[in-house]
Image: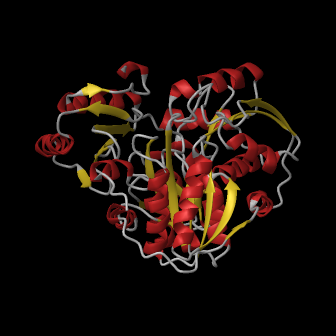
Amino acid sequence: MQKFDKKILDNVFHAYDVRGKVPEELDEEFFEALGKAFVKYLNAKKIAVGRDIRETGVAFQKAFIKGATSLGCDVVDVGEIATEMIYFATGSDLSFDGGATITASHNPPGWNGCKMVSKGASALSSDKGLPEIENLVMENEFEESEKPGTVTEENFYPAFKEKVLSFFEGTEIKPMKIVVDAGNGIGGKLFDYIFGDLNLDVTRMYFEPNGNFPNHIPNPIELENVHEIMAKTQELQADIGIAIDGDADRSFFVDNKGRNPDGVYIGSIFAEYFLKRNPGDTVILDPRVIGPVDDAVEKYGGTGVRCKAGHSFFKQKMKEVDAIFGSENSSHFFFRDFYHADSGMITIAIMLKLLSEGLDFDEKLDELYKKYPKSGEVNYEVNDVHSTIKKVEQYCRDKYENLAFDYIDGVSAEAKDWRFNLRPSNTQPLIRFNLEGKSKDKVIEKFREIEKVIGGKRDNMPVLKELQ
């Protein structure tokens, strides 16, 4: 049996998925072992396996299935899908013991990976599941079954479409002009399949699936990947622009002023929507920036629960407290009525519903931007991530008497009129810094102060121009 390099395995097993470069880190032998390890860890008898549109997806899916069936597990091949369709398959059909999508999400060409869930779309993460699976791959010693599992195919597209459209809840979607950038990922195919029957005037950008991503990387969280849709939405004075990430589990929005709000602002709008309909319910929020969502939860009588960033951690917390909605700042949005999982297509459906019910998106963003200024997430290259975080914490403890600290994700410090979060990257030797405040001047003042303590080299620019 092939033995795998532990250093490489440690590099490709992340906090909530597997992701690495091809072929330096990931190949067919790895995916065959991963399929075996996944089945053994879950003691699975039946699983669903799909893939996104990357060029190595077909070969890696076949290898994963080969490994899974060699241990006697039956596999349902669900074909070329968005990641959220694995959540749908395993959430809607509890005969599945788990599911896996071969995907590297929004990463550039030359990468691939895998997102895995257990029964009921329950996520695996570095807290539970992924370390055990990594160890099984490392050992690569499996007792194969005398009777291999079967492989059948199933098309989940029709049922998934029905599920997504159910979030309209009887609202008739009004005619509107929209711009959609699918980034050559799976999202264009999925968008047309689900929303193609609506009375929408759609300007399509990069809908052709192409794993080489010839136009831009399908990662809408980075400004260089959305400047085209921002300009086009403004040029056409469209009702809204929609950018979809590579495996379609996240959707981002652009208004006709060309602004691209991040997840905390959209999360605030959605929290208001859900709590108006479900007073007193629970919303999960991201500790990196909390103001807009926290205030919406308080205003509409809900309970806010903070959770470590990462889609697997959010899924776990959503299930644990049976939350109605979860808002991660990276624009993963989670829904109780979708097995507590995240969905880019449901995110689009709810936004279309809100617009049809009279939401003035531009006006709402004007309000949120003015009331909740923030630095944006800024990265720093430092020599020692953990000692730098401790240094910043000690500085704040020495200087300020009334700061409240929490350690849900890195360290957060909160005063009456400003707050910051400092956390290590899950994948790189970087510190990620977010600061928010009650006024723009306060954000600028405190950002400059804390940045001096961090030291290191900026890896990207703040949102506020005054800080660039």
Q: Residue extending furthest left?
A: 398
Q: Which quadrant: the C terminus?
A: top left
Q: How is the image coloured?
A: secondary structure
Choose between 233 and 58: the one closer to the eye.
58
x and y, in percent, of residue 218 in the image: 58, 35
x and y, in percent, of residue 86 in the image: 62, 61
Residue pictured at 36% horizontal, 22% vertical = 467
In the figure, is residue 225 to the left or right of 376?
A: right
Choose between 228 and 394: the one closer to the eye.
228
Look at the image and tell me whether residue 32 can be seen. Answer: yes
Q: Which quadrant: the N terminus?
A: bottom left
Q: How many marks?
A: 0
Choose between 2 and 317: the one closer to the eye.
2
Look at the image and tell me whether residue 271 can be seen. Answer: no
Q: Quadrant of residue 155?
A: bottom right
Residue pictured at 59% horizontal, 23% vertical = 227
Relative to 452, residue 190 above or below? below
Q: Quadrant of residue 93?
A: bottom right
In the figure, is residue 206 to the left or right of 214?
A: right
x and y, in percent, of residue 448 in the image: 27, 26
Choose between 95 and 181: the one closer to the eye.
95
Residue pictured at 10% horizontal, 43% vertical = 398
Residue pictured at 48% horizontal, 56% vertical = 31
Relative to 205, residue 174 above or below? below
